[in-house]
Image (cartoon, rainbow, N blue to C red):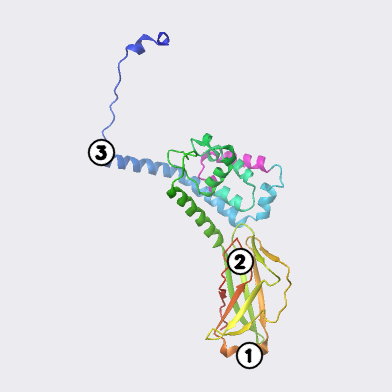
Amino acid sequence: MEKYVESFILTAGSVDIESPDLTKKDRAVYAKEQMLSTFKKVFPYILIGVGIGAVIHNWIPEAWVELVLGSNNPFGVILATLVGVPMYADIFGTIPIAEALLSKGAQLGTILSFMPALALQPFADESEIKTAYQTDVSRSVILGLVVGTGNNTVRPRDAATRAQAVTIVGRLAGLLQQYKSNVAVKASAQESDGQLQMTLSVLNNTGKAITIHHSNGQLFDFEILDKSGNKLYRWSDGRMFSMIVTTTEIKPNEEIAFSGVLDAETYAAMKDKIACIKAYIVGTSSDFTINPDGYWVTLPA
């Protein structure tokens, strides 16, 4: 092959280019300048993306998102792709928007169509990811579970270390905790016409519907105790409940209330003995943590 190489290439000597001699302080200053420069360029897109995501998450009804980008709209992917065209400028601005749409019921395939090519191919070695796992990896990137191993790579064929596994599990636990903590349970009681009105409310502040599973027709309960912890009254005592398994579904941003009334005569007889009242959700849920020990009721003044 040497006959195809020009002679001046073969006879040329090596060329040494002097590189600046930087001290550690100079390198730190240079790194700081580059970091600030990149931050100033990226931050406006992050701010815009978080703002749009917040609007979608808090003010746009889930039904609208499902109607436009849900599985029932065959043009959802096309629409999402067209909307995503201006977002090619920066991936950081699209992630908060994608997360908000995903939590509102938009299909994952539609979300991935919305994300720009930069988001769909976040790693230089993405070609090494098996096709069967590419969607899961993309979703993990959207949720912030996977951020790569440096140099814009994910090294899909390398074995994960314990530290990496713990990091991902920790991020997942954080997401679950954030999701579950957005369900507020509150118990209260107030006097009305000599009776005691007890209420247990559940507010769903998440972006998805939550479900409570009941083993029978009893959904809740209230218990009144004296200062020694002895039971004075239990709402469910003497009541009959169906033996049919039931569920309670609470839609996003919806609040439901379970109520029980203690009649005036019974309440008057024990009023001076009441030390505390507890409310119970009778059931289980994989969407939020139900306290098996019950919820303390705010006593009427």
Q: Position of residue 139 (x, y in %)?
A: 56, 46
Q: Position of residue 23 (x, y in %)?
A: 25, 38
> Vertical placement of 111 versus 180: above or below?
above
Compute the Cα span from label 1 to label 3: 83 Å
Where does the C terminus fall, quadrant-wise? Answer: bottom right
Compute the Cα span from label 2 to label 1: 32 Å
127, 46: nearer the viewer: 127
Q: Residue at (58%, 69%) from the top-left corner?
A: 185
Q: Specify start and end residues of the magenta stretch as a single range.
A: 76-95
Q: Amino acid at mark 3?
A: Thr
Q: Amino acid at mark 1?
A: Ala
Q: Which residue is mark 1?
A: 268
> Vertical placement of 220 versus 286: above or below?
below
Specify the label residue 23 is tagged with: 3
Q: Quadrant of residue 209?
A: bottom right
Earlier sequence position, callout 3 versus callout 2 = 3
Specify the label residue 79 is tagged with: none
Q: Secondary structure at mark 2?
A: strand
